Image (spheres, helix red, strand yellow):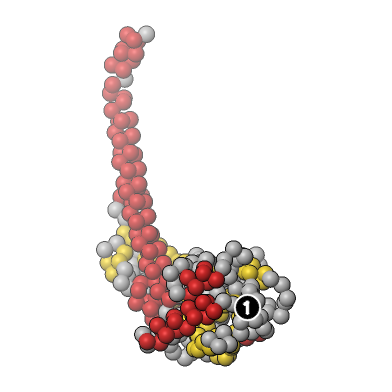
Amino acid sequence: MLIKIVRFLRGNRGASVPFVAIVLTLLLILAGVVIDLGHLYVVRQELKNAADAGALAGALALFNIDVSPHVLCAEARAAALATVQLNESDHQNLNILSEDVKIGFWEYVGGVWQFREESASCPDEINAVQVTTRRTNEVNGPVSLFFAKFLGMDTVELTAKATAMRGWATSLPEGFAFPLAIGLTYVPKTYGQIIPVTFSPDWGDTGGWHCFDSEANANDLVNYINESKPTPSIDLNDWIYVLNGVATSVVMATENMLKQYSSAGKEFKVYLPVIDATKMTQTREVLGFCAFIIKSVDKSTKAVSGDALGFSLVPGETTSPIPPENNNLRDIHAKLVQ
């Protein structure tokens, strides 16, 4: 058998040469196409990275607590454009068309999450920025190919799109919640609104003290307040354990912290779970969150007074595109959603 194979190869040596040449040519072309495809993948990823960065920068610039109005669509657009232009694609600086940055809403419609542009105005509910980056004939130029030219393909147009959202916090991370809960009727409903609130030691419609769960005690509350022990993380729809009355040590710890913040020229700003304070049950459902500035502590009556704020920023472990009914905390972070 071996002898027959050898004889066959010797007899067909001349015929195999062009066959091998054709196979090698095809392999070389295939290898070149693979190289071009790899190049396209890299450029596509560069465009995606630039779109991601632009969308995140735009979403971060959407809100500014220190100015009015707080929602800043023009600033968000400018931040997105500038960020994209800091990136490169295929060793050249990226340009971006103004119309490729869109401001609008990330919302749930027809069973899917999608982006809806808002170009006519800049309402308070705006929560998302969408950025498209391109390598096309109109901007940045298409991507040049090398080996694929032999197949009649000189260039390829590429685009990438990213959407980033800055929504409403539906949770508070560890160390942020405070052991006071505010009644839902005292939560401001509009940006900039302030409602004065006094918490007495006994439960009232304004709310009162809580200890997160039934296992906590006065020492735990003191440690939470003086920040020697981080408060537990807390989510929307969690249940907290409310208290009738409060220890003097807890009130004194609150007063001491207020003095420390005041001496440093800072506001004693805390974040409170929102509850239905009219219910007469020991456990209450967390209906939202509200920023609160503690302004005075009366040791004789154990009363804590301050202002509930109508707008604030806070890190949210989870966020929602739709503001919960009794929650006006915007997430300090932005996240990619598309």
- Element under label 1? loop
Residue at image location 34% in from the left, 59% down from the top: 43
Residue at image location 32% in from the left, 48% down from the top: 35
For this orientation, the residue located farthest to the left is 91
Inspect this view and state whether residue 108 appears. Answer: no
Quarter of the image where one finds residue 52? bottom left
Quadrant into which the N terminus falls:
top left
Q: Position of residue 98 (x, y in %)?
A: 41, 79
What residue would you read off at disc 1?
245
Residue at image location 59% in from the left, 63% down from the top: 215
**59 up-or-down from 185: above or below:** above
Q: Where is residue 233 in the image (x, y as percent from the top left)?
A: 52, 66
Inspect this view and state whether residue 61 appears. Answer: yes
Q: Is 54 left or right of 278, judged from the image as shown? A: left
Who is closer to the viewer here, 124 or 106?
124
Q: Position of residue 63 (x, y in %)?
A: 46, 81
At label 1, the amino acid type is Gly
Q: Position of residue 22 (x, y in %)?
A: 32, 35
How dense is the environment of label 1, judged by Cα within 10 Å: few (below 14), some, or many (20 and up)?
A: some
Residue at image location 31% in from the left, 30% down from the top: 20
Who is closer to the viewer here, 8 or 238?
238
Quarter of the image where one finds residue 67? bottom left
